[in-house]
Every structure is written in structure tokens, then in C-alpha cells.
Amino acid sequence: MDEEYDVIVLGTGLKECILSGLLSVDGLKVLHMDRNDYYGGESTSLNLVKLWKRFKGNESPPEHLGISKEYNVDMVPKFMMANGALVRVLIHTSVTKYLNFKAVDGSFVYNNGKIHKVPATDVEALKSNLMGLFEKHRARKFFIYVQDYEENDPKSHEGLDLKKVTTKEVISKYGLEDDTVDFIGHALALHRDDTYLDEPALDTVKRMKLYAESLARFQGGSPYIYPLYGLGELPQAFARLSAVYGSTYMLSKPECKVEFDESGKAYGVTSEGETAKCKKIVCDPSYLPDKVRKIGKVARAICIMKHPIPDTKDSHSVQIILPKKQLKRKSDMYVFCCSYAHNVAPKGKFIAFVSTEAETDKPEIELKPGIDLLGPVEETFFDIYDRYEPTNNPEEDSCFVTNSYDATTHFETTVKDVLALYSKITGKELDLSVDLDAASAGEQDAA
């Protein structure tokens, strides 16, 4: 281990693995270490026995839940937008050859006490039971504007400069009702709060277009895809990739102490009496606790069921977004459901997650609106974890620390964090213009 590396990465969570893969493909010499004896860190994937042990102590799980090893329960479950940045990153690194994807069946939004399919096109707007007759026609006009909008074609702009005009101003031009704005902003554009309404509309229009283009990609019921066997496959796929590029992975490395010189710059990592030297450190918040601050908590429930979520057209995999306004909360709530169709549970079993930014210390009460949508549940595990963000200046100490995972059940915020960190580490933007068909390995599954 007494060698010199360009970068040492600590922790094998999804963000760290993606960064490690990107840097390896760039030709950097990378050493990737984890104090745990398993891949994934906070975003690991657990079988039933491990899940039980983590949340219920040492009892054994009941037999009616099925075979332990047939469970692959992701601790940070997130769907991928089919045409989104993460899929482009996976293609850029060729990691897609180690993974099989399957389309996610449904994308829903909670509105006035019921769940509805998220309409993403003018045709779907007319069919949607989210809106009354006149509102459908107003929404249809807005969707057509978004679909036809091309940044480089002024004719499609209808006299609006979306780099200057706010989202609120564009929406008011079409006279949309508050409930419609709510589902467009939170379930289609995937904003987590309402600050977007006062910001230039271009970002929201791009997000809506990404949703619609991703939806069209597999002709499924949602714009999302998910790997067979869950996200636990991703860190291992990146480990394989890194080996191809000459990088080194080491699990079960105790301590992993970051070493600093007199000026406060990191120069290496010590484990088991040996020090590996490096120019830069990439790590999750747990490896450098004095360089992060707590910014919130995520409350979540993990539920095992033997049926799909009611009113989702028997979808085997689904996301439901409950906008904060509908719940009179400060933040949105998310429901993620996957099943044996994605090989994450035994036949006939479904796994649902309900998550939100915690506003109390009582997840059982706080998550009730989401849990109530699930129908009968065989087993529930409650959990609250802290969220951290870095406070250091990487230019001064050469340490690049990732943010903790948020409550969302999609990858859009996570991959933003990864790409921003990649630019800080390398000083360049990642080129994401790739052939999206390279991620259609599971297209036959996605049909």
C-alpha cells in the first residue's frame, strides 16, 4: 500500500464509486478503500437477515417473509431517469455492460387525498383525472409549448426569454391552477421546494422535457429505470470497471485515517500502520466528521408487503410523490416501491420505502400519509438518519467530501452533487453527450 496515488477514495457508497469510476476512466491512479467488509456504505443493499439485524436486533426474521438471500433491499433506493445525467455517466464509463436495467412501471402524484398518474404530455394531460375539463385544455397548451420549446430556435420561444422570465410568469401566461402547478413543479420537474417559481423558467422547462423524453424512451408507464437486483449492483460494477483501468479497491481497511501536512493539506491515508500517499482525497462525511456540518435528517419507513400499492394499476415498481403543499408540510414525501419483478425480493413480495426530510423525531407519525397509501403491510422498519454537507475548502486541504443522501426517490439531486464534485476535482466539466442506446441492455426487460 506504500505507493503514491492521484486520488484516494474513502467509502464505497454510490457517489464515491461513481467518482472513482469517472476519475479512473480519465486515467488517474485511484486507490479506493472502505472500513466496512461490504460495498455500498450508507447506500448498501441488505438481504433479509441483515435488514432484520440492523433494525430489529438479533431475532430471526419470520419464515413467511421468504428466503433471506432473495432480498436485495437498497438502503438509499433511487430510480434513474432513463435519459438523465446518471445514465449518461454510466454510459460514459461503460459500466452499463455490467448492469441490466428494467423500466419502472408507474409514476404517480398525490393530490387531494388520491394518487394519480403524472401526466407528462399534451395527450396525457387531456386524459388525466387530476384536472377539470377547462384546466386540461390550459395544461395541454402549456405542455405543447414545453414540448416544442428548443433553446436554439427563437421561433419556439413565443416571445419569452426563459433565461430571464420566471417560472411563475410563464405559468400565469397559461392561467394554470395551483394544484396543477404543484404536480408540474414537484412530480414532473422534480423540484423539492417552491423557490423555482421565482427563478428563470429555463431550468423547469428543461426538467419537464427530460421527464417526457425519458418517458418516451421505453414506452413504459414512467420515465424511470432501475437495475435488476437493485442498486447494490452499482458499486460492484464500478469496482470491476476500476480494475480494468488499473485502480485498486480494498475493503475491510480499519481506521482509514486521513493524514495532513503542516499547512493543513491532506497528503495520504493510514490504515493498519501503512500510509498511502495521494494528491487528493474523496470521501463520504463519516471519514472526515470535523469537515462537515449537520443540515437535516431523513425519516424513512421500509415496508415488506405481498401486493402492489393500491390504485397504481398493479404496478410492480412505482414512485409516488406527495407534494408538501398537499400534506401541509415543509418538504415533499416520497414513496418508492419495487418487487420480485426487479429481483429485489422473493416471488410475490414487494418492498416499499416512504421517506421525507424529518421535521420531528417521530417517523411513525410523520410518515403516516405515505404509509397509508400502501395498504396492508407485513413488516415495517422505521429509521432516521442525519444529513451532512461539507464545510471545508478543497483548494486549501485537498479533501473533496460528498453530501449525505437526501429523501428523494430519484437520482437527479445525487448526480448533480457528483458532477459538481467531479468539476472541482478535475477542473473540467464532464462531457455527457453519449449514445443513450448503450444503456438499453434491459430494453427487452423494459418492454
Image (spheres, rainbow, N blue to C red):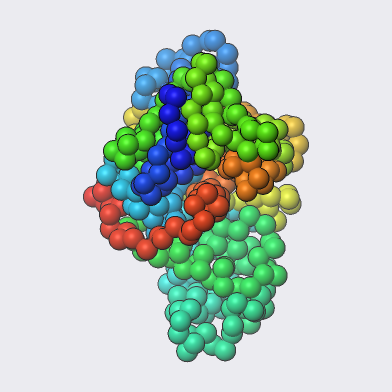
In this view, which residue lies farthest toward the right?
360
Tell me if residue 26 can be seen. yes
Vertical order, 325 against 12 (above or below): below
Percent x, y for residue 212?
43, 65
Indicate the position of residue 34 as horizontal and vertical percent values.
Answer: 49, 26
Given residues 103 and 96, the one toward you in this image is 96
Q: Does any portion of residue 366 appear in the rendered image?
A: no
The residue shown at (35%, 56%) is: 220
Point out the residue furthest to the top here: 59
* Number of marks in picture: 0
Where 292 falls versus 207 (above or below)? above
Which residue extends farthest front?
262
Depth order, front residue of 302/194: 194
Residue in view at x 55 percent, y 52 percent: 424
Q: Nearer the viewer, residue 424 or 153?
A: 424
Location of residue 336 in the rendering, given as x and y in whole percent from the top left corner: 50, 42
Indicate the quadrant where residue 158 lies: bottom right
Residue 215 is left or right of residue 355, and the answer is left
Q: Residue at x 40, y 19 (%)?
A: 68
Q: In the displayed structure, does residue 119 sit left or right of residue 327?
A: left
Q: Is residue 12 left or right of residue 199?
A: left
Estimate the x, y position of residue 35 in percent, counting from the top left: 51, 22
The N terminus, quarter of image: top left
Depicted 167 relative to depicted 184: above or below: below
- Is 188 left, or right, of 360 in this rendering? left
Q: Residue at x 61, y 67 (%)?
A: 180
